[in-house]
Image (spheres, coloured by chain):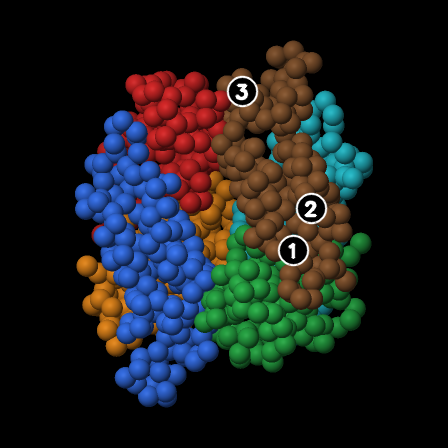
Chain colours: A red, B blue, C green, D brown, E orange, F cyan
Amino acid sequence: MRIKVSRREHFNSAHRLHNPEWSDEVNERVFGKCNNPNYHGHNYELIVSLTGEVDQSTGYLYDLKELSDVIKKYVLIRFDHKNLNLDTEYFRDLNPTAENIALVIWRILRQQIDEKFELKITLYETERNFVEYPAH
Amino acid sequence: MRIKVSRREHFNSAHRLHNPEWSDEVNERVFGKCNNPNYHGHNYELIVSLTGEVDQSTGYLYDLKELSDVIKKYVLIRFDHKNLNLDTEYFRDLNPTAENIALVIWRILRQQIDEKFELKITLYETERNFVEYPAH
Amino acid sequence: MRIKVSRREHFNSAHRLHNPEWSDEVNERVFGKCNNPNYHGHNYELIVSLTGEVDQSTGYLYDLKELSDVIKKYVLIRFDHKNLNLDTEYFRDLNPTAENIALVIWRILRQQIDEKFELKITLYETERNFVEYPAH
Amino acid sequence: MRIKVSRREHFNSAHRLHNPEWSDEVNERVFGKCNNPNYHGHNYELIVSLTGEVDQSTGYLYDLKELSDVIKKYVLIRFDHKNLNLDTEYFRDLNPTAENIALVIWRILRQQIDEKFELKITLYETERNFVEYPAH
Amino acid sequence: MRIKVSRREHFNSAHRLHNPEWSDEVNERVFGKCNNPNYHGHNYELIVSLTGEVDQSTGYLYDLKELSDVIKKYVLIRFDHKNLNLDTEYFRDLNPTAENIALVIWRILRQQIDEKFELKITLYETERNFVEYPAH
Amino acid sequence: MRIKVSRREHFNSAHRLHNPEWSDEVNERVFGKCNNPNYHGHNYELIVSLTGEVDQSTGYLYDLKELSDVIKKYVLIRFDHKNLNLDTEYFRDLNPTAENIALVIWRILRQQIDEKFELKITLYETERNFVEYPAH
């Protein structure tokens, strides 16, 4: 049976939900106050989980200090204290919903983590709203 | 790969664990202080999770504001600040254990949520005791 | 300067807010859903704080294991898995609001804790509603 | 002895720390990544505390449902899902640090809450950074 | 569909990460400050989850009070307020990483819990680092 | 009126409660399992609070990033992943109870923080046991 290890980090960002192909009225109706043109923001809580086999010499599946460093270097430095719509390349043409932010983080980290580990992202936008990718 | 989104809500209810087919002694032995005839209560924390595909036009799997409204309309209005045994139809003949409350909420919401979404209920009776349905 | 030590415990109870001198309409208007005749309930989080001088031989202000035992013996055994209105003597003629529950617990524990320690009660009825007695 | 009751609410906002009388270099040096011109954001947790006497007929110091409504009507509607710098009048000429946001909320609510109650604001900008006004 | 119930407990232990087949330099490089020869420690949060069918006569999958007693009797009594390396037989020749502690607890409890229930262990070493076994 | 700002940090340490002037029997009776000769450990949560006046040019009472750096430089580097009894000078002749650890941290930081700020330490040994110095 395989084991899963997880590391929790956080970042604080501004964002706005908006679909440029829609009128202001439709955006307002669909996204409500999340469509505010001047942005709002969140303390995002990010959990990165890896599944695989324990290394017998260390007793680690993956050194969580190293995982923390990878998350900082490839995710937090790009998203923390940023405006997700304006300051990152990822959300120029992609709506920064929690779902899409989780997908983007998964794609970024998938390139940095050895394929022998399954990778899962859990992202809390608030204490009440959160997403997981992949679902299982 | 599919994505999962979750919404957390809460309700405060009284309940009593009791099997009417058993003697008082057996009820007392099996359910202990949870069998108190005058009821006790909990702050239930409810997490409703939906799994499926992201809508490309919104970036949402399901609008969590709408999910919150559905939970309020079909679950919270019936359970919040109620006596689960006396004030709801669901637990007239069903013991209101955390397991059964989760099953009842799953059945209520399954009728309101499009079948294209997998539905999962997580229910915390206390910080230390919680149930998930379905298990995976 | 004096030091303060605190111990957190919890109890799960049913209660109903009601003033018997008022009509049902007034009770309903004032207490809303907390007036439900069949009761509702909460996971109460209780913090008991003592202020005084550290004992030089132990390094303790007060042994928190002993404080936990005192709370269990004089408070939890009376309130946990009980109906506060029906199962306790304290709320026969006193409305079991969070304010009054905190006052009652303070009076119970004040008789058990040496007067050389200041005593303070903090009581969470929910994560969002809590009271402190005395205020400072 | 007086009692204190508290209500916790939250709001999600964008902000930027900046002193317009300083050069960009000084702003960058003093405020670091909080000076990002395109803003960042937070899930602010707000605790509003009132101290006074319990009303003997209700057992309440202050109806926390009413307090919640007052906070929503005078604070959350102005700050939630807003850009504090651009969308509110309060931070046109005042830097929206946690300290200043707490002071502004205190002044707003002080006008709505009867003077017989002491008012205190606790504001969490993150789980690790928070402010209280007044301090005691 | 099957249901899952979980019970959360905690224990406080000292430990040291070390591979006796390696030099001090390699141990220091691999385990960093976790290799401190005089040990450090953690408040471990342990979640034990069982999956199976609900018993129709009780409404329980498994009595969580009994599960708590099993965890106390077979796990906490051995690990709580102990030095995992020195005071337990399990980590004489096994590095007490969170991964290995979770595996050991799983093996201990697997012998005590009826095979008709799937068993899962989740172990938080800190709020930011945690492991799950089995992974799914 | 003055304002208070707080910064939360954490450290993970081993410790043992013991009074060398007492027999083993007395130590065992007074300190119970906290007297385990091979140590146990905790994830300590530390909150450092400063009270004073807001600087009008920054809107800060004290830059919490700087406060975090001071705590890391003078407290965490000495206590994190250490054995408090063996690896620090502070607890050679002082029992490392939560009370005494809080007092020691207060004395360390009092030398680093300008006297115009009141300094308060809150230290959580576990979620259930915590101390504050000074008490008010």
Check disc 1 and report its element: helix, strand or loop: loop
The residue to which callout 1 is attached is: D62
Q: Quadrant of residue E22?
A: top left
In the image, taking residue B34 as reference, residue F32 lies left or right, namely right
What residue sits 41% from the left and 40% below the top?
A: A124
Asked whether the residues under marks 1 and 3 belong to the same chain, the reply is: yes
**Residue situated in front as seen by the camera: C127 or E2:** C127
Q: CA distance from mark 2 to mark 3?
A: 36 Å
The residue to which callout 2 is attached is: D113
The percent coordinates of residue A52 (x first, y second) are 26, 43
Q: Which numbered circle lies on residue D36?
A: 3
In the image, taking residue A4 as reference, residue B10 lies left or right, namely right
Dot 3 alpha-carbon crowd within 10 angstroms: few under 14, some 14 to 19, many 20 or more: some
Dot 1 alpha-carbon crowd within 10 angstroms: few under 14, some 14 to 19, many 20 or more: many
In the image, taking residue C89 as reference, residue C2 lies left or right, namely right
Contact, mark 2 vs mark 3 (Cβ under 8 Å): no
Q: CA distance from mark 1 to mark 3?
A: 41 Å
The percent coordinates of residue E49 (x first, y second) are 32, 60
Q: Mark 3 is on which residue type?
A: Asn
The percent coordinates of residue F4 (x first, y second) are 71, 40
Of all chains, the one bearing label 1 is D
What residue sits 74% from the left and 31% below the top?
A: F54
